[in-house]
Image (cartoon, rainbow, N blue to C red):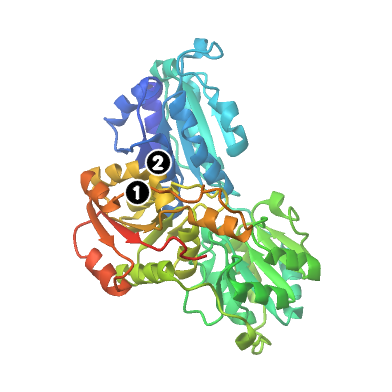
């Protein structure tokens, strides 16, 4: 059938099962909006393109399917870059569609022209510039296949505006996805032998385990070999909090996890990257503790720490193949009583525990700062894909957009854990939540400071810079009410449990302004 490029784009998105798109209109993409109005796809208009990209990410993180974001040329496209980088760092499947100036004007410094293909190249898995309407459907199919296969990630499709108005033949096609990568049988057998020889193994579960749906097999393995489990921020939920040997999330404040890693004789990682953030990884190198690494991305093998053995392939397929070869161990040789306590206790951690207890099976999103660390250690999360945070990039302002996207993916009530610094970044997306009746609980940990920066500067004994103090004194509850949401203020003197119950007793969305002492957590 003969269709315009814009109608081909929308038909191809429908073909891929897309039901929600997050975006912001502009002149070069208006033809797509005309086509969307006649389609089955719901467009969610956000307050800013960055919020739209974070929302598409939240949708993908919660659902496991690629999120889709739509933006116009120039500043619309460049406003996506932080979200694209965030998805790239955390291996989140995302398809970004940008309009551009007409094909003949590319390279002429036209109004709102940016070479978004080259700008985004370092932070996307793949990029496509479409130069004819007949290329649009194949480009969409390729983008989804790449975004959702192997190590998942963002793919950009850039389309000049005149191509969207040109006509071409469109033939529907069945949705196809590449099969997940199967691991080598030999590597699986060697992995089983390595595990059998270990007396004190530790399992480290990351986002790759959650992305592959490998959490059940991972816990079966942990039970068989009597191993303690540690997770990354991205792997939260892969290990139930009531597993007796769950040591929490690895961070520099989790002394228990760090001590276990230092004592183990085999470090088994499933879908987890190694970065420079945590000192515990230095212990692996110093003590030459053998590393057994499961990962779908061959480029991650030996990248930061040399593995004694690597298994490249889908985590669920790898663990399912491994389990029949693993014999159940006797009781582990771990003396758990000798391990130190976990993370710190303060008013912020108590608030997060009270909120997640009261809200039940809630999806939690966070921004970045002290509150992110508190939430990672204290939010009660029982299943994967319910703790959404900017892990690799550490993008402030992530939480609001991500929560909106997560709601459209699942229907969940979402808890946004944020700080006053992070909330100031993207508080405009509260208007999006109000407009679309998204049930959000936004918990602002308000210490009138950039808490993480304050902590780092305190550790470095930096004096007198003043950059960590915000001096804002904003009434966030009143601000929320001005945007059409409910607003509540909780003072430092109030009982946390009672205050949380009272704050949640009313319609959503609600912003709860938790007043904290400036030195909380330091």
Report if residue 138 is visible in the image: no
- The spot of residue 92 in percent (x, y) is 52, 48
Q: Quadrant of the N terminus?
A: top left
Mark 2 closeness class: few <14, some 14–19, many ≥20 residues within 10 Å: many
Q: Which mark is residue 21?
A: none
* Sequence order check, earlier mark of 1 and 2: 2
In depth, the one of 128 and 5 nearer the eye is 128
In depth, the one of 182 and 94 nearer the eye is 94
Q: Which residue is depicted at the point 65% across and 57% down?
A: 295
In depth, the one of 275 and 64 nearer the eye is 275
Element at label 1: helix
Q: Which residue is depicted at the point 55% across and 59% down?
A: 455
| Residue hosting label 1 | 404
Q: Which mark is residue 51?
A: 2
**Residue 112, above or below 228:** above
Mark 1 closeness class: few <14, some 14–19, many ≥20 residues within 10 Å: many
Q: Is residue 235 left or right of residue 496?
A: right
In depth, the one of 342 and 407 nearer the eye is 342
Asked whether the beta carbons under mark 1 and mark 2 sit within 8 Å of each other, the answer is yes
Within the image, what quadrant is residue 311 found in? bottom right
- The spot of residue 518 in percent (x, y) is 44, 60
């Amino acid at each position: 059938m003969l269709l315009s490029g814009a109608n081909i784009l929308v038909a191809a998105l429908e073909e891929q099962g897309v039901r929600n798109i997050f975006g912001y209109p502009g002149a070069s993409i208006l033809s797509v909006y005309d086509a969307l109005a006649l389609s089955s796809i719901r467009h969610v208009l956000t307050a800013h393109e960055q919020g739209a990209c974070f929302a598409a990410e939240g949708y993908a993180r919660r659902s496991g399917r690629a999120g889709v974001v739509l933006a116009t040329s120039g500043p619309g496209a460049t406003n996506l870059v932080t979200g694209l980088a965030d998805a790239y760092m955390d291996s989140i499947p995302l398809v970004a569609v940008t309009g551009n100036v007409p094909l003949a004007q590319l390279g002429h410094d036209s109004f709102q022209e940016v070479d978004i293909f080259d700008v985004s190249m370092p932070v996307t898995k793949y990029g496509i510039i479409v130069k004819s309407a007949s290329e649009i459907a194949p480009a969409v199919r390729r983008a989804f296949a790449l975004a959702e296969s192997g190590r998942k990630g963002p793919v950009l499709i850039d389309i000049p505006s005149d191509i969207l108005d040109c006509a071409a033949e469109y033939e529907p096609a069945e949705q196809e996805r590449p099969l997940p990568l199967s691991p080598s049988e030999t590597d699986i057998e060697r992995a089983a032998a390595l595990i059998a020889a270990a007396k004190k193994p530790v399992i480290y579960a990351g986002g790759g385990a959650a992305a592959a749906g490998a959490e059940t097999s991972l816990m079966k393995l942990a039970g068989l070999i009597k191993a303690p489990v540690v997770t990354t921020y991205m792997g939260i939920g892969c290990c139930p909090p009531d597993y007796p040997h769950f040591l929490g999330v690895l961070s520099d404040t989790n002394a228990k996890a760090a001590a276990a890693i230092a004592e183990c004789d085999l470090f088994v990682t499933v879908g987890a990257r190694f970065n420079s953030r945590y000192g515990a990884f230095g212990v692996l190198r110093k003590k030459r503790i053998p590393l057994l690494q499961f990962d779908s991305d061959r480029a991650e093998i030996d990248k930061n720490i040399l593995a004694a053995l690597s298994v490249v392939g889908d985590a669920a397929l790898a663990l399912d193949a491994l389990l029949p070869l693993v014999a159940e161990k006797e009781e582990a040789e771990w003396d758990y009583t000798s391990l130190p306590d976990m993370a710190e206790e303060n008013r912020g951690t108590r608030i997060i525990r009270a909120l997640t207890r009261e809200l039940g099976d809630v999806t939690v999103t966070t921004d970045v700062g002290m509150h992110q660390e508190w939430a990672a250690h204290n939010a009660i999360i029982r299943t994967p894909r319910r703790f959404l945070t900017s892990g690799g990039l550490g993008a402030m302002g992530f939480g609001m957009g991500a929560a909106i996207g997560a709601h459209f993916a699942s229907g969940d009530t979402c808890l946004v854990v944020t700080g006053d610094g992070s909330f100031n970044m993207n508080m405009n997306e509260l208007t999006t939540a109000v407009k679309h009746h998204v049930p959000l609980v936004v918990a602002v940990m308000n210490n009138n400071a950039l808490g993480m920066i304050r902590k780092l500067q305190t550790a470095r004994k930096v004096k007198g810079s003043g950059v960590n103090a915000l001096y804002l004194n904003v009434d966030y509850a009143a601000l929320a009410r001005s945007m059409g949401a409910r607003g509540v203020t909780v003072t430092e003197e109030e009982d946390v449990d009672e205050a949380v119950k009272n704050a949640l007793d009313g319609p959503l969305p609600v912003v709860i302004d938790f007043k904290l002492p400036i030195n909380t957590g330091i």
